[in-house]
Image: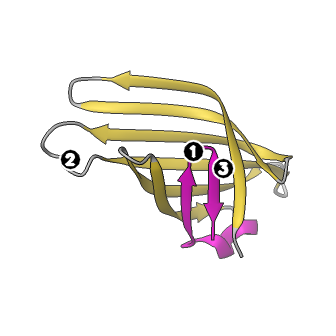
Amino acid sequence: MYLSYKLQYTYQFTIDSPTTFWQIESGSFKYKEKLMGHYESKLSKVKGNTNPQQRSFVILQLNFLRKQKGGAPHYTILLGERDVTTQVENGKIVATSGLYKSKIGKLYQRQGGVLTIG
């Protein structure tokens, strides 16, 4: 079964140095138009001849509004890479809170504002 979330960023910050490009983004995400929580994305790309395939390293964290016992939010951390030319991001879930532990290792794809986990 696939899950699709719609990501809507509210904040985006970039740092463009001679050797590295960083992009930090945050916002909210929805499932079937229902607000599910907030996300943060950190992208880094090494410039120059050491990155001929033009790929970027991405960490994406989903923080759900639903809380765990004790009040901490449920979360999911995704690790992947983004192809700079197509802007398609692929990776897998690497860590979660207890409620979503069965999702660890599942693949994901992000294209624009749509995140699909499956």
Residue 11: x, y in percent? 61, 25
**Identity, as a three-letter code, of the amino acid under mark 3:** Leu
Q: Which mark is residue 62?
A: 3
- Distance between mark 1 and mark 3 Cα atoms: 16 Å
**Identity, as a three-letter code, of the amino acid under mark 1:** Gly
Q: Which residue is mark 2?
A: 51
Question: Residue 51 magenta-drawn?
Answer: no
Q: Which mark is residue 100?
A: none
Q: Which circle, 3 or 2, is nearer the viewer? A: 2
In magenta, the rendered stretch is 98-118
Q: Which circle, 1 or 3, is nearer the viewer? A: 1
Tell me which corner region of the image, top left, top right, bottom left or bottom right, holds residue 69: bottom right
What is the secondary structure assignment of the residue under circle 2?
Answer: loop
Identify the mark nearer the N-term, 3 or 2.
Answer: 2
Q: Write the residue at 36% across / 44% down.
A: 84
Q: Which residue is mark 1?
A: 112
Question: Residue 110 magenta-drawn?
Answer: yes
